[in-house]
Every structure is written in C-alpha cells, then in structure tokens.
C-alpha cells in the first residue's frame, strides 16, 4: 500500500516564507480599507451541514464539495463558499440589527476542481457583503470598493469588467431555450467557446435572440459596446442602461480607465440577479475578484433581502505581488550570539532590537564559529556578540570584519 505521508493531496499545496508574508500584507491592507468603510468582520465555520448549500446546487454542485460526516452520521461539507454561510448567519443571528449590514470576512475556501485545470482546491478569500441595500447607489459603491481593494494591495495594473445577468437571461427566454440548454449555453459563453456554442444553437432554427446569443462572447470593450447590445434585444434595454449608468458613475469617480464592459460575463446565472463584475490583474490569467447582486439568496433562509458583494482571491493577488516584486521580504539584520552563561543577555538584546524594528535571531549555538557559519549560510549581514567580548562582526562576501 503506497504511503502519502510526504506529499499533499492533489489541488492542495504548502505555503512558505515570502508567500505567507505577502498574503498577510494583502489581508492587512484589505482589512484596513474595509473597516475604514464601515464593514465589520465575521467568521463562519470551516464545516457546514450540506443542507446549507443544497438549495444552491446550480452554482455549487455536490461534486465540487469536500464532504464528510459528523458523529451522528449527518453529511457535512468543508466551506466551498463564504456568501451562502453568511446569508445563513445573517438570517439566524443578525436579524435584529439595522439594515443594511456591512460585513466582511477572510477565510479559507475548499472547492474541488478538475485535476487538469491546475487550480488550487484550497485558497484564502476575502470579501464583503452589503445586505439589505438595493439600487444603483449600492451597486456603484461595490464597484468603487472593488477597485479600491485591488489598488490598496499595491497593484495599479488592474481592470474591472461589468455586465448585467438579466441581459443573458432575457436572451435565453427570447430564444426559447430549455433550462438545460440555457445552462449549457451559459457555460460555453463564459468559456468563450465559439465553436461549441454555435453547435449547441444550430438547431435548424434562426431568430434574432439566437443570433445574439452566438455573438455574446464577442461583446467586450469600452462602454460604447453597449450600443451594439441595445440592437440585439429591445426588451433588455433596462439592463443595458443600468450598466451604462454604472460606467458613467465610475468615470465620475475617476475610474474610467479601470472599467470595461463584457456582455459575455455570465457566471452563475441562477445565483446572481443583477449587475455582476470581475476584477483582473495584469499577468494573471484568471479573475482575482468576482461579485455582483444576488437578491434571491437570503430568501433561501427565510429572510428575503436585497444583497450585493464581492470576493477577492487573496492567494492570486499575493502571487501577482510576488512576481512583480519578489525581493520585498525583510532580511534578518542580526544574529545575536551569547553562548553558555549569556543566553539571557542575548535574548534581552533580541527583544531590544525587535522593539526598534529590526528582524533578528538569537543564536542557539554554544561556539562562536558555529554561529558565524550559520549566519553566512542564512545570509545574515551582522553577527552581534554579547558576553565577554561584545561587538558586531560584519559578514561580507569577502569575509568578515569587526
């Protein structure tokens, strides 16, 4: 029987050194921004009953979840999403608080992906939920906040893509597609798989709505692309105009160059009910931010309420930061060596240097030669001696000097 005690499961990986530090910086930057905008942090369990997600099977099918059972045999899942548990939390524990609620979270997500996709099954997600707020003002706030979140991480090369899920839903209805065919079309449009989409819609019939669905993946660009969209389906003009107003609002906020329109953005049609958007970073091949309006979700827990929000994949943002600036990790400034009889003095000196903002280590070695050899291998520039002959030894490529 093979042993797996030295490897991680497929889709799961260890996180080391600079990755941990960069992830923490991203989390701290986002938390500071969100708290300054009035959002309060909440946490939900890493394990939930499967029933919490059972009504959401269209967007979180059971095969995408990690499942196990409790001591009573009840089916549990490892958290595949944060918004749905927060809807449960809001309906059961926050019912007496004034609306709208501004909540944010920073949690691990566990979601199965195809082994061929190369996507991690575990990742850190930070997000916001604005529950109890409807209308264009709330949608615009979410878009502005999404842009600010990406900018607060120190990344200027980002863009937001905006759509309205109602446009796609009206096209599917006008085309007379069955729910199954509509869902397949959504997936193909989302993947921009033009050939397979044409095959699906080539059923011997033709209509303006079918032609519009075929062209949907190509409707991407600046706000002017909405003029083409208006000619595709007259009944969808309210959705087109809603996107146009939001683009105008972002322009008035000084964010025109960060916004694009993508009418092929049709993720999770049964989950979202209005404006949807995604955020991208230069050099990252998948979205690092995703969100939109989901006015129907709270009703699943007996507390109907309008809601909108978005989530940031912290691990993807941290990876992009590391690629753009891989040398930001603070080096060890001092290795403090005391040796036998001077352990306490060395530890006190370490405390003092740490209070002054230096990153340092205390030598566990008994002999100075061992400490010096370790410092060289560790890349530490200064060996600080405490004890009978205190002083600093500066370690360079050429050797050491006092």
Image (cartoon, grey):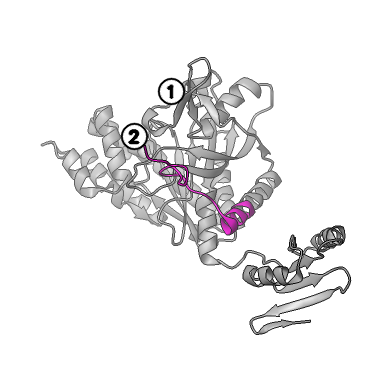
Is 394 drawn above or below residue 370 in the view shown?
below
Quarter of the image with the N terminus is: top left
Q: Which mark is residue 54?
A: 1
Is 401 drawn above or below residue 121 in the view shown?
below
Of circles 1 and 2, which is in front? 1
**In the image, residue 286 lies at what x, y percent?**
41, 52
Q: Which mark is residue 310?
A: none
**In the image, residue 305 lies at what x, y percent?**
55, 26
Q: Alpha carbon of mark 1 to alpha carbon of mark 2: how far? A: 23 Å
Residue nearest the viewer, comparing 189 with 295 = 189
The crowd level at tag 1 (other Cα within 10 Å; few <14, some 14-19, many 20+) is: few
Which secondary structure lies at badge 2? helix
Residue 190 is inside the magenta segment:
no
Which stretch did the figure color magenta?
A: 1-25
Which comes before the other along the chain, label 1 or label 2? 1
Image point (44%, 28%), residue name? 67
Q: Residue furthest bottom?
A: 398
Image point (53%, 36%), residue name? 308
The residue beneath circle 2 is 169
Q: Is residue 101 left or right of residue 55?
A: right
**In the image, residue 75 lies at what x, y percent?**
46, 20
The crowd level at tag 2 (other Cα within 10 Å; few <14, some 14-19, many 20+) is: some
Is 382 drawn above or below residue 198 in the view shown?
below
Can residue 249 be seen in this snapshot?
A: no
């Amino acid at each position: 029987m093979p042993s797996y005690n030295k490897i991680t499961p497929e889709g799961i990986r260890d996180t080391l050194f600079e990755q941990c530090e960069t992830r923490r910086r991203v989390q701290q930057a986002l938390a500071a921004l969100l708290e300054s905008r009035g959002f309060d942090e909440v946490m939900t369990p890493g394990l939930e009953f499967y029933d919490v997600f059972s009504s959401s099977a269209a967007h979180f099918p059971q095969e995408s979840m990690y499942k196990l059972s409790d001591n009573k045999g009840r089916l549990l899942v490892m958290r595949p999403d944060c918004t749905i548990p927060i809807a449960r939390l809001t309906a059961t524990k926050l019912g007496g608080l004034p609306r709208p609620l501004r909540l944010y979270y920073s949690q691990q997500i566990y979601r199965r992906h195809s082994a061929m996709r190369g996507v991690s099954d575990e990742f850190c997600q930070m997000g916001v939920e604005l529950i109890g707020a409807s209308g264009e003002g709330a949608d615009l706030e979410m878009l502005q906040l999404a842009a600010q979140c990406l900018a607060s991480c120190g990344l200027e090369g980002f863009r937001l893509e905006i759509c309205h899920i109602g446009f796609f839903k009206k096209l599917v209805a006008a085309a007379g597609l069955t729910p199954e065919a509509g869902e397949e079309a959504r997936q193909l449009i989302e993947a921009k798989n033009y050939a397979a989409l044409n095959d699906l819609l080539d059923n011997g019939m033709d209509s303006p709505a079918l032609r519009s669905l075929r062209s949907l993946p190509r409707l991407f660009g600046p706000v002017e692309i909405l003029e083409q969209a208006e000619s595709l389906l007259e009944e969808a003009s309210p959705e087109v105009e809603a996107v146009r107003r939001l683009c105008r609002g972002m322009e008035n906020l000084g964010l025109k160059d960060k916004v694009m329109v993508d009418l092929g953005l049709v993720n999770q049609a049964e989950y979202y009910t209005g404006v949807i958007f995604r955020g991208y970073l230069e050099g990252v091949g998948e979205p690092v931010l995703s969100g939109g309006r989901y006015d129907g979700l709270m009703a699943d827990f007996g507390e109907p309420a309008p809601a909108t929000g978005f989530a940031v994949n912290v691990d993807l943002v941290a990876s992009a930061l590391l690629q753009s600036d891989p040398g930001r990790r603070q080096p060890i400034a001092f290795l403090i060596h005391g040796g036998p009889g001077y352990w306490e003095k060395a530890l006190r000196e370490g405390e003092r240097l740490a209070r002054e903002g230096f990153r340092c280590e205390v030598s566990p070695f008994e002999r100075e030669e061992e400490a010096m050899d370790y410092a060289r291998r560790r890349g530490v520039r200064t060996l600080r001696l405490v004890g009978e002959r205190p002083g600093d030894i500066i370690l360079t490529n050429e050797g050491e000097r006092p």
